[in-house]
Amino acid sequence: MPSESYVITIYSDRQKGLIQAVPEVLSQAHHSYCMRHLTANFYSEFKDVLLKRLFWRAARTLRESVFKDTMDQIKARNENAHKWISAIPKESWASFYFTGDRYDVITTNRSKLLNAFLKNARKLLIASLVEHTRWTRWKTSDFFQKRRVYGDEWRTQLTNYAEKHIRLAKEESLQYVAYRVGLHVFEVRSVQIQDSVNLHLQTCSCRVFQTIGLPCGHAMAAIAITKEKNLYSFCKPCYKVDRYRQTYDEVLYPTLDRT
Ligand SMILES: [Zn+2]
């Protein structure tokens, strides 16, 4: 079974300093460009909603054939738009080519909340800055506390997101027929396409299994014809409720006034 990866992924808005600094300072890190920022720049340049949608599809797909087909559609509609996109290394934005772990997250939206806490503090004078820092600690503490409450309420093995994914993948698997073609390898057929699943490596040719660390519909169809009853052994440990609780377990203690 694949072990957990601890190589970090940096998300950024493609700020020039970061493009140079990430490979120098964090040579092992994978640098992912935020698609929200990229598409905003792209749209301000080409003002075409359909092109923007196609750009998102190219970024989101985990199938190479869909990526290439979408890029061809962009080129057919606007060659300059295709050139604009092609000038950005695809390993930094297109999910199919991204080699790190980013769990299908392609924007910096989730960090915006924390960024917003500090955004207005830059121009403050020292006394106000100290006050603002206290407020930021309080907000962060509140952020942790709310997640401790969520974590305590869950009675499932996995987080809500992962349990929902498993439920939908199970439903999807009903349209597939799986055949074992090797000790760990399965061929999974549907009306349109056939995929290959390796349950030992936890991979699928659709790339959902290895990208998000949870079984896709194809993997579910494969698991269903084995004697394996524990679905959770095919899910990355980071989705376990215990892990979620550990993440938010630390207490941010207040800094008390000195007299
Ligand atoms: Zn799959």
Image (cartoon, rainbow, N blue to C red):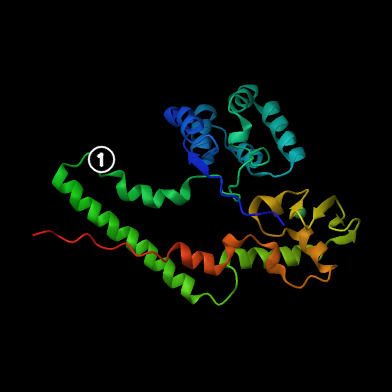
Q: Nearer the viewer, residue 222 or 185?
A: 185
Q: Residue at x 74, y 67 (%)?
A: 170
Q: Residue at x 52, y 35 (%)?
A: 38
Q: Is residue 136 left or right of residue 16?
A: left
Specify whether tag 1 is near ligand 1 (CB below 8 Å).
no
- Identity, as a three-letter code, of the amino acid under mark 1: Arg
Residue 7 vertical placement versus 147 (above, below)? above
Residue furthest to the left in view is 259
Q: Residue at x 61, y 43 (%)?
A: 100
Image location (x, y in percent) of residue 136: 28, 54
Image location (x, y in percent) of residue 227: 83, 71
| SS label for mark 1 | loop
Image location (x, y in percent) of residue 138: 28, 60
The image quadrant where one finds the C terminus is bottom left
The image quadrant where one finds the N terminus is bottom right
* Residue 81 at least partly seen: yes
- Which residue, given by chain and number where applicable, does mark 1 sit on? 122
Q: Residue at x 74, y 39 (%)?
A: 64
Q: Quadrant of residue 224?
A: bottom right
